Image (cartoon, rainbow, N blue to C red):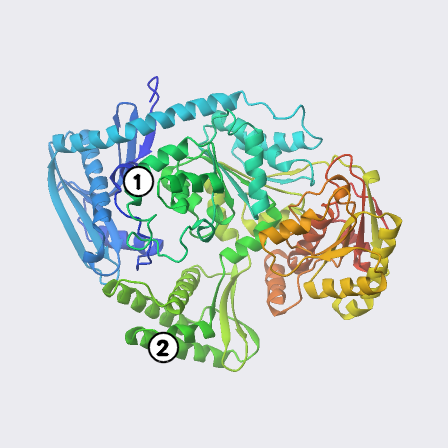
Amino acid sequence: MTDGVKYTVAVRALCEFTAKQGDLDIRFTPSPTAQEGMDGHAVVTSRRGPGYRTEVSLSGDWGDLHVRGRADGYDPDQNLIEEIKTHRGKFAHIPDNHRHLHWAQVRVYGHLLCRQLGLETVNLALVYYDIGSGHETVLRETREAGELAALFEDQCARFAAWAAREAAHRAARNAALSTLRFPHADFRPGQRELAENVYRANASGRSLLAQAPTGIGKTVGSLFPVLKALPQQGLDKVFFLAAKTPGRRLAIDAARSLGAGTGLPLRVLELTARDKACEHPDKACQGDACPLAKGFYDRLPAARCAAADVAILDRDALRDVALQHDVCPYYLGSEMARWADMAVGDYNYYFDGGAMLYALAQSNGWRASVLVDEAHNMVSRARSMYSAELERTNLRAARANAPPLVEKALARVGRAWTGVDKEAPAPYQVLDAVPEKLLDALQNATSTINDFLAEFPGPLDPELQRFHFDALGFIRLAESFGEHSLCDLTRAGVRDSSISIRNVVPAPFLAPRFAQAHSATLFSATLSPWHYFLDLLGMPQDTAWADVASPFTASQLDVHIAANISTRYQQRSASLGPIAALIARQYGERPGNYLAFFSSFDYLEQVLERLAREHPEVPAWRQERRMSEPERAAFLDRFTLASRGVGFAVLGGSFGEGIDLPGDRLIGAFVATLGLPQVNPVNEQLRERMGAMFGAGYDYTYLYPGMQKVVQAAGRVIRTERDRGVVWLIDDRFARPEVRALLPAWWQVDG
């Protein structure tokens, strides 16, 4: 450290940095859930005497290093500090390197306690509690205070060089951010208003919903003020979360435009899903299978130092560093999340049940500012994070190759499932609660599988492992089942059915994540009405709302309603000819590049076929089902300044948001249908629940989500103050007042 500046580190982080060694080993082993771990701690401490203290806060200094943490328990009568670890299965199967790390932690706590109480000796214990049997295995030792001080000093000395480097980096980062200037000569219209609102939210520690038009530069307009607030508010991290790859690339480009990688001491990390980052997808994540896992922790220090010198660790840069040091790129990225100033990733890294960034922020006490791009996607994405489904076909596949004892437990699941099927004979039926007999059978089956793995470590049959994971997820959500979710059964034939816990209101799950953040800013062009997002996402009650005025004028965009066409399902076949004629007429009046959006691939294909047959003079190409990233890029590459034609795409899909085709690359859009979600039994149940909870069943289920897709798609047309274009809204319902009220205020609608 420099100039007497303290660098604070948690005991756990200090030990993980200095005491981990050997192979990376991520094979699936039966381990307690977080709740089971907490329950296990509670059981152990309840067995102790009346003077036993839990969660004992301890701290101490070594040079400019400040170390702090909480010991699990201290018994003053025995002068005994305990570190409690829960496990499942045989104690002998706990790896030695794990125990080595655990001893390092309890010895640090022992030193801090000796220093705090002036003790000459202290008793230390590792308590391993088997949640299956309730048995405690206790490892004990007695240490002299001087001996523990020497061990502590050794760890701190090994960490100090890194800590000094980190403290110097943070000081340089904060100094540079304090004088950071906007990267362009001036803000775009609307961009300054957005930046000011984001800055005020961070300065006051509040959250913000910011609706801002497409094309004003929301990414840099939100990132710049957060970076300015970092040193002033003592913030540690920025988490920039996006729903899709283009949004993450924009965030990295924005950081680069602000100086990251060219002088600004800001570490930017892109987090990539494991299946995309894996170099050996055919190998298990363990030392005896993957060369990048073998000796991972031995080579990690050098890789970490090298990675810390790379300002922008995007996917390619991270891979380069990892392979230079023969370590796994994905797990090097997970390590660097601890040391990056700005982490860029998908929503799930902060908001889902096992979110890495959220867990790190909690365990390290980080003050983080969270930016959520294209936040209109958050409701549907969060619902999927907290939903689970079990399929009868997967249960049969799991039983096919299961060991006899496991097969017997799965057979019990099958019998309980049959009971549910008999009680719910309809093709689709909402159940009053999660079926207790089925839940008991699932818990027994997962425990049996865990016991089997504890006895016979090794890979499970893939189908059995898949059902096991599905069942664990189902059980976890069943523990918190309530009004925010529904349990339903869907029948797919005589023998097959699926049972789901379907989240409808993510608020109870997301609220703690918003509370953990210093500030969370959700921004998008379509966040109206704001109460819809506050209600469903569980944002704090003092969340601020900003509706940024558009820099665009009505004269830039001709908006027409084709009120003589109905795109309702019943009239869809009658709409094909009129829509094809409308597209051809508009193209004939002003040849150029257009996008035409439809509610489904089937509808798209029918209109495209009619256009090709009746108006062959209009060039057209289409979005294919399940396009790869290169195929999506090729689709967009057809929109050039010199090209002409109509690209057909699905509303709400890859090309309905997050793409930028300024100027003559795109001069118009046709939006057929209101984008309303399909009327089906699930959505009708959702409508009923939204009506009961918020008094707005149809709007919350159908109208608002549909119109968000419409406005997003139409927003592809005007991207700069120089653009001119046209939008056709194709359906008579667009003329209704309640629908027109959800269109951007700057539009002047004709029709």
Q: Position of residue 19 (x, y in %)?
A: 25, 40
Give the side of residue 56 with respect to residue 79, left or right.
right
Q: Secondary structure at mark 2?
A: helix
Relative to 331, does residue 234 appear above or below in the rendering?
above
Q: Position of residue 533 (x, y in %)?
A: 60, 48
Residue at the spot 40% in from the left edge and 77% down from the top edge = 414
Instruction: Name the residue type under label 1.
Output: Arg
Give the side of residue 53 with respect to residue 142, left or right.
right
Give the side of residue 482 with respect to residue 145, left or right.
right
Q: Secondary structure at mark 1?
A: helix
Give the side of residue 184 with respect to residue 252, left or right.
right
CB atoms of marks 2 and 1 within 8 Å: no
Give whichever of 568, 540 is nearer the camera.
568
Q: Position of residue 481 (x, y in %)?
A: 46, 61
Label 1 environment density (alpha carbons within 10 Å; few <14, some 14–19, many ≥20): some
Q: In whole angstroms, how far apart are the C-alphas of marks 2 and 1?
A: 47 Å
Ranked by sequence position, the earlier of labels 2 and 1 is: 1
Image quarter for residue 165?
top left
Query: Can residue 23 be seen in this snapshot?
Result: yes
Query: Can residue 563 be seen in this snapshot?
Result: no
Closer to the observer: label 2 or label 1? 1
Q: Which mark is residue 101?
A: none
Relative to 54, does residue 674 appear above or below in the rendering?
below
Instruction: Name the residue type under label 2.
Output: Arg
Residue annotated with mark 1: 299
Q: Quadrant of the N terminus?
A: top left
Residue at the spot 77% in from the left edge and 62% down from the top edge = 608
Residue annotated with mark 2: 412
Q: Position of residue 316 (x, y in %)?
A: 48, 41
Relative to 744, does residue 383 appear above or below in the rendering?
below
Relative to 618, does residue 557 appear above or below in the rendering?
above
